Amino acid sequence: METEVPCLDLSLPEHALSAQLRKACTDTGFFYVANHGIAEDLIEEAFEENIKFFALPEASKQDIIADENNRGWTPLSEETLDTENQTEGDTKEGLYFGREVPADSPEAAQPLHGPNQWPSPELLPEYKRVTMAYFEAVTALGMRLLRLLALALNMEPDFFLHMFQRPMLFLRPLHYIPRRSQPDQGIFAAGAHTDYGMLTLLKTDDAPGLQIWSHGRFVDVPPKPGAFIVNLGDMLERWTNGLFKSTLHRVITDGSRHRYSIPFFFEPDFDTRVECLPCCCSPDNPPRYPPTTSGQHLLDKYAQTHSGYDATSKHPTNLLTKAVSASKDTVDV
Ligand SMILES: O=C(O)CCC(=O)C(=O)O
Ligand SMILES: [Fe+2]
């Protein structure tokens, strides 16, 4: 079953786009973006390099196993996005890259900041060049969307821009193995979850599988050639007091083929204050969440779903998505 996920044509004038964006953000929290300006060749190259990476022998991937800054390879089944409904881990592996932060920079003292771990250039000579070019291109697209988001909220267009001086940016190529998902058996390619952060810019190959929760059921969001899929995360839902939706989603595979996707998680600077926007509250609609910061929000979300997690220490697994069990909390205490 398919649902009508709106498609924003970025070649339209901003005033038209911002109205469409507001509707998409308040209705579905998911939308396609067409005419985004990122070269198809670059996208293709990024997928080709990742297909090569995931085909490397296990030992080569182990060499760059994810570190405490969320950078590096996460093996098959390492992540269980929906602990309530899954009987095994997600049938996918991934590779995280963040904004490059040298180990000797003061920024590296913060959780989630540090140098990247790149696949060996002897094995994959083009990997770093292509991935960095792709990273830069999706960052620029994210910046364009920030302007539109501010306009969609009837705010100054540069409202969010200054919060992205040292942003937390994570690119995470994923490889789903050809394993048939069996929801009734608790086997999922990616369990149901919402994304933690502000915005996710997702490119998938042409294999279907992504589904979003809509009107009481999961519906397909098929790949659209030439378009990105963009969704809002919990941080933006919190910032807008629930006006903009962070929608539950999952991935189901039919076992017939490999599936590759590249989500890009786009989050403001660690210290950015995330407090109900004035345009999103009123005496009748008071703020539902206390103020926090971008970094603290991500760390708290993680602690909610991982018992024993110490938010003051750096920690090696996925901080950018969360299990469904905690997805619809309304008030932080
Ligand atoms: O692979 C996909 O289509 C979706 C991945 C996703 O939802 C995530 O990584 O948060
Ligand atoms: Fe997600």
Image (cartoon, grey):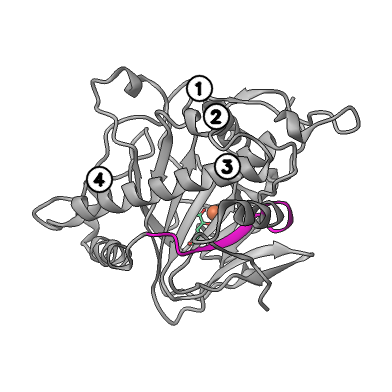
Q: Which of the pair 241/6 is nearer the observer?
A: 6
Direction from residue 260 to residue 276 in the image, left or right: right
**Magenta-span inclusion, residue 33:** yes
To which residue does mark 4 refer? Answer: 64
* Vertical placement of residue 146 versus 290, above or below: below
Q: Of marks 1 and 4, which one's residue comes earlier in the chain?
A: 4
Direction from residue 127 to residue 325 in the image, left or right: right
To which residue does mark 1 refer? Answer: 271
To which residue does mark 2 refer? Answer: 294
* Vertical placement of residue 113 versus 59, above or below: above
Q: Which label number is shown at residue 23?
A: none
State the residue at coordinates (34%, 40%).
71
Q: Which label number is shown at residue 196?
A: 3
Work out how far the residue at label 4 is from the one at label 3, CA to CA, in angstroms.
24 Å
Q: Quadrant of the C terminus?
A: top right
The crowd level at tag 4 (other Cα within 10 Å; few <14, some 14-19, many 20+) is: some
Q: Which of the pair 147/231 is nearer the observer?
A: 147
Image quadrant of residue 139?
top left
Q: Quadrant of the N terminus?
A: bottom right
